[in-house]
Amino acid sequence: MTQRFADILQGLMDNRGLSARAVSRASARAESTILQLLHGSVPPSPEMVKDIAPVLEIPEADLLIIAGLAATSTSSPPRSYRNSTEIGELVSIASSLSDEHFRRLIDVARNLKSEGHN
């Protein structure tokens, strides 16, 4: 089952033009974890699936079934799929900023969020 999931995961990533690094950044999972999943050396856990499903733009319950895991009705509603790759890129950029620029980025993001709630 682990290798079958690895093959399907690779196909989903290929279809979406996603690298292991992009999935890692957008899911907040270590790139080594994504690579281990792709090589079939670790089985997927429900927590991994929950983090990866939005990046792949696939419902969590569907990816749980693909992974051979129980899809529970208590699963949280799917997170937004919008801009997953760009969010990963933003995290990558933010991690290389100076402390001052990082604080400014946080301030800008908070202002944009509050503008969106008006």
Image (tube, helix red, strand yellow):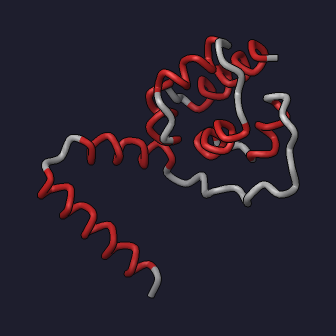
Indicate the quadrant where residue 45 lies: top right
The residue at the point 67 percent across, 41 percent down is 47
Residue 98 rendering spot, x and y as whole percentages: 13, 48
Q: What residue is at 61 percent from the left and 57 percent from the top?
A: 80
Q: Quadrant of residue 67?
A: top right
Of residue 48 and residue 87, the one placed in the foreground of this image is 48
Q: Residue at x 44, y 88 (%)?
A: 118
In the rendering, at what x and y percent does residue 13 appear?
60, 27
Quadrant of the drawing holding the N terminus: top right
The picture quadrant where one finds residue 68 is: top right
Q: How many marks?
A: 0
Picture coordinates of residue 34 (x, y %)? Answer: 55, 25
Q: Position of residue 115 (x, y in %)?
A: 38, 81
Q: Is residue 106 above or below residue 5?
A: below
- Is 52 placed left or right of 59 in the picture? left
Give above or below for 85 relative to 14.
below
At a point 62% along the width and 46% down the height, the residue shown is 54
Left or right side of 82 for 71: right
